[in-house]
Image (tube, helix red, strand yellow):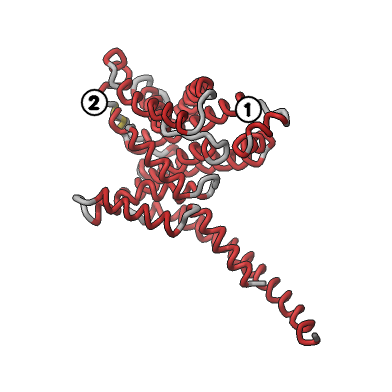
Amino acid sequence: MAQDSARIPQLRVKRIAFAHLLADWRWPAAAAALVAILVLPFVAKNFFIFQLTLALIYALAILGLNLLTGFNGQFSLGHSAFYAIGAYTAAIMMEQMDIAYYWTLPAAGVICLIVGFLFGLPALRLEGVYLALATFALAIATPQILKFTPLEHWTGGVQGIVILKPDAPLGLPINPDQWLYFFTLAVALVMYVCAVWLVTSRTGRAIIAIRDNPVAASSMGVNVSLYKSLTFGVSAFYTGIAGALGAMVTGFVAPDSFTFALSIQLFVGLVVGGVGSIAGTLFGGLFALFAPNIAEWVSKGLAGAIYGIILILVIYVMPSGAAGLVRLVTSKLARKGR
């Protein structure tokens, strides 16, 4: 008994020391990551900067999908349509209306918000696989609509629209790829902060309650129909802004760039990053962009098979996504420190 009582203070000291160790490493690691993010564009090649920027844009689009699927429980396979609407909004405003690139972001977001909300209204009657089928139809129809002959004056038809990348403001000595990296980073930071605020707010709790039990949420006074439609609109808002950024970064939009394959790519990023995790969407964006490139680098002829193997291995190792793996490792380290 005396030995056991003597061990208790030692265990407490170890637990406190481990907690301090985690706290001590958290801020230096965050500071090191911030320095790397800011310095990387000046030491990396332009193509790698372009890839990182595009991965961040994909993460932003996946975040929009996560708000709908992960937090509200609505299943969508049509977010490539909202990405396309945002991209074409930016392209038309920049190249045909000569409007500054930064004004295209709120315009693309608002247009997609309206379209998403209006699409969400009739979709209220649908749930599960039926809602997925309706959004699938939206993803299939959008590229064909963009090729529609009466709209060619605006969309450029099959040829698409070429966009000039914006230069850095105030005469900053950086090239357009570097500037778009920092611009996208700033926009993404604001959007992620807003997403965290939304999820932790009273509105966010209502959205999550609908996902968990819509009948119980309705009995508590939550307007299920309104919140579902608004969530669809907000999700489209995020994806539309991502599409506008994607148009600026790639410098080109065409209907065949926004096929159903893009919706699958975003959905895969959602699952790999972690459904219902905001931070996990960053890993999902990296996976959505780099995994197909790695598969093609290994073998161009068997790129699809290799990508499938990579995806199976990732899901086997991380069945709850990257966010779930981080939570598991953290909990195990915490138990060892006790």
For image coordinates 73% across by 31% down, the residue present is 220
The amino acid type, in three-letter code, at marker 2 is Gln
CA–CA distance between discs 1 and 2?
42 Å
Q: Which residue is mark 2?
A: 159
Mark toward the start of the polypeptide (1 vs 2)? 2
Q: Relative to 123, is 192 above or below?
A: below
Q: Which residue is mark 1?
A: 224
* Classed neighbour count for the residue bearing mark 1: other residues with Cα under 10 Å, few (<14), some (14–19), many (≥20): many
* Left or right of residue 307, residue 79 in this image: right
On the image, the x and y values in percent for residue 167 come to 37, 37
Q: Are marks 1 and 2 in contact (CB under 8 Å)?
A: no
Q: Residue furthest top?
A: 150
Q: Regarding mark 2 in the picture, which secondary structure is present there?
A: helix
State the residue in front, 161 or 76: 76
On-image quarter of the C terminus? bottom right
Q: Relative to 297, is 198 above or below?
A: above
State the residue in front, 293 or 207: 207
